[in-house]
Image (cartoon, grey):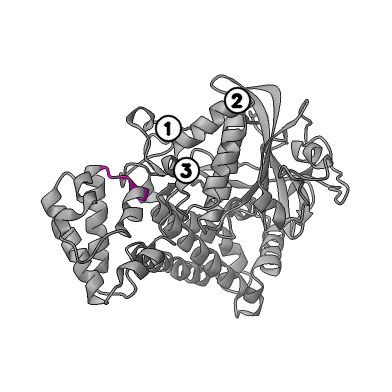
């Protein structure tokens, strides 16, 4: 259900700002099913009034009317520093449809825009559109992207670009930052309303717990611990894990300067603006834990409704300590599956970490390597495994492959069955930056065919798709260093 808080201290009621002469750039028929939009033979809505609505130019379709769009206020920590009041600076929540919140990103200024223009550019909108749908197809909890609508309206970033509006769907866009805001302003009435809404709409089991707010905090931590483990499992780097970008539903939101790993570097930084590497790949679990600590601080007033202050802090600290436990269990389970291991053995973590260290030392492509492991013949000599040639220290990798094969044989693994299972968890296709860049450059010339093709490929990331084999390859050297920043 849609965000229900109202009043000037919580939301701004406003209309989206229209864009001139909108046109379709991309549309997800998969996301459209969530909200029951009938499509024509070209994969766009039969009801043509949806174009104006998803551009921010209208609030009415033949079947829906969005009567009270809002932007919400929140606060948060950005790059580890308290930033104070923030809010939906360029996102406007149209309302609820089929139990999904429909939000327009790039729909114009709000009172929370600060120095921003409230707009999004075509480049960043395409990236969010593609990655939202790619993550969904990978089985990772995420907001969805319904569409990108473009316009020739000029928007200034590092250079002059054109405007676009990305329509996003989620059961809720409620963030850690919403709780931080009302805790920081000591608005306990609003803080409680927010928590009660979250429990009522998304965590109903918490209502019957002995302490509903403590149980709610537990559940939020667990979901986000598992989420970041899934990110690590596909080599996804979020780029800006500020507390205001963290969902309290444990879903991935706010795709800005993200990136999937190509050459594996444990300390890879995908965001050019992150000069200190705070949000590097290997730090994502730690930072998510840190963000849960921010949420714990915001929850103290809620627990104090039923407990003394010191006891409230102790209870939340104890709950927070479970984050690395849940994360570790989820990570180990996931990487066992990535290696095709059906059972748990004591040396598994060491086996996984030895592989990751070797991949880091030799800068081996993350996705290709794990996909290729499914093809190993456990009866063949390790020197015949072609992937050994991707590593600098081949003798060391021969030892690793020997240990890996012995581990597989210890549980009587059958190659054909193992391959099927591994290919269900190790994708062949991910949204590599160089592929997105090609689609963006063509779209900037009003050619949206590559965007549609890339979306089609990413919707089936675990399938072979022989006709698109080239899209599974790592980037060529000249395209391996594409950088993205917070303006993305």
What residue is disc 1 on? 272
> Which structural element holds mark 1?
loop
Q: Which mark is residue 444?
A: 2
Residue 198 relative to residue 364: left or right: right
Dominant SS of magenta comes to: loop
Q: Nearer the viewer, mark 3 or mark 1?
A: 3
Q: Position of residue 118 (x, y in %)?
A: 68, 32
Give the mark nearer the N terminus: 3 vs 2: 2
Residue at the (14%, 54%) spot, across then down: 383
Residue 480 against residue 411 in the figure, above or below: above
Identify residue for label 3: 468
Closest to the camera, between mark 3 and mark 2, is 3
How far apart are labels 3 and 1 at the CA level? Answer: 30 Å
Region of the chain picked out in magenta, as a range? 363-367
Q: CA distance from mark 1 to mark 2?
A: 23 Å
Q: Where residue 345 appears, x then y in whole percent? A: 26, 74
Q: Local crowd at mark 3 within 10 Å, few (<14), some, or many (≥20)?
A: few
Give yes or no for residue 117 being in the magenta stretch.
no
């Amino acid at each position: 259900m849609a965000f229900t808080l109202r009043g000037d201290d919580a939301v701004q009621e406003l209309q989206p700002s229209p864009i001139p002469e909108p046109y379709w750039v991309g549309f997800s028929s998969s996301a459209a099913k969530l909200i029951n939009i009938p499509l024509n033979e070209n994969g766009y809505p039969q009801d043509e009034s949806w174009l104006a609505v998803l551009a921010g130019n209208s609030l009415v379709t033949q079947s829906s009317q969005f009567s009270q769009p809002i932007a919400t206020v929140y606060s948060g920590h950005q790059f580890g520093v308290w930033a104070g009041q923030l809010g939906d600076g360029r996102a406007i929540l149209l309302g609820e449809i089929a139990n999904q919140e429909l939000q327009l990103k790039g729909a114009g200024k709000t009172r929370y825009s600060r120095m921003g223009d409230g707009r999004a550019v075509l480049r960043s909108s395409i990236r969010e559109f593609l990655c939202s749908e790619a993550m969904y197809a990978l089985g990772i909890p995420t907001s969805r992207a319904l569409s990108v609508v473009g316009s020739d309206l000029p928007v200034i970033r590092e250079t002059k670009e054109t405007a676009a509006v990305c329509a996003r769907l989620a059961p809720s866009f409620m963030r850690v930052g919403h709780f931080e805001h009302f805790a920081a302003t000591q608005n306990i009435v609003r803080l409680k309303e927010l928590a009660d809404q979250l429990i009522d709409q998304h965590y109903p089991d918490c209502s019957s717990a002995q302490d509903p707010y403590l149980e709610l905090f537990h559940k939020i931590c667990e979901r986000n611990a598992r989420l970041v483990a899934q990110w690590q499992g596909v080599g996804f780097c979020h780029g800006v894990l500020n507390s205001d970008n963290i969902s309290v539903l444990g879903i991935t939101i706010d795709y800005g300067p993200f990136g999937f790993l190509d050459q594996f570097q444990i300390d890879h930084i995908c965001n050019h603006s992150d000069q200190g590497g705070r949000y590097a790949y290997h730090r994502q679990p730690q930072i998510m834990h840190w963000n849960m600590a921010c949420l714990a601080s915001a929850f103290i007033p809620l627990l104090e409704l039923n407990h003394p202050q010191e006891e409230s802090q102790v209870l939340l600290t104890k709950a927070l300590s479970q984050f690395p436990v849940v994360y570790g269990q989820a990570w180990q389970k996931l990487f066992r599956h990535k290696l095709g291991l059906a059972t748990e053995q004591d040396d598994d973590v060491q086996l996984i970490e030895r592989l990751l260290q070797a991949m880091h030392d030799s800068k081996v492509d993350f996705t290709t390597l794990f996909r290729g492991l499914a093809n190993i013949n456990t009866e063949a000599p390790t020197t015949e495994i072609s992937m050994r040639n991707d590593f600098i220290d081949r003798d060391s990798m021969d030892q690793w492959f020997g240990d890996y094969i012995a581990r597989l044989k210890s549980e009587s693994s059958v190659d054909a069955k193992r391959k099927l299972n591994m290919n269900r968890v190790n994708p062949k296709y991910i949204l590599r930056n160089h592929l997105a860049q090609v689609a963006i450059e063509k779209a900037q010339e009003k050619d949206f065919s590559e965007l549609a093709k890339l979306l089609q490929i990413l919707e089936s990331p675990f399938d072979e798709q022989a006709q698109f084999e080239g899209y599974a390859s790592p980037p060529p050297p000249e395209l391996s260093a594409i950088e993205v920043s917070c303006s993305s």
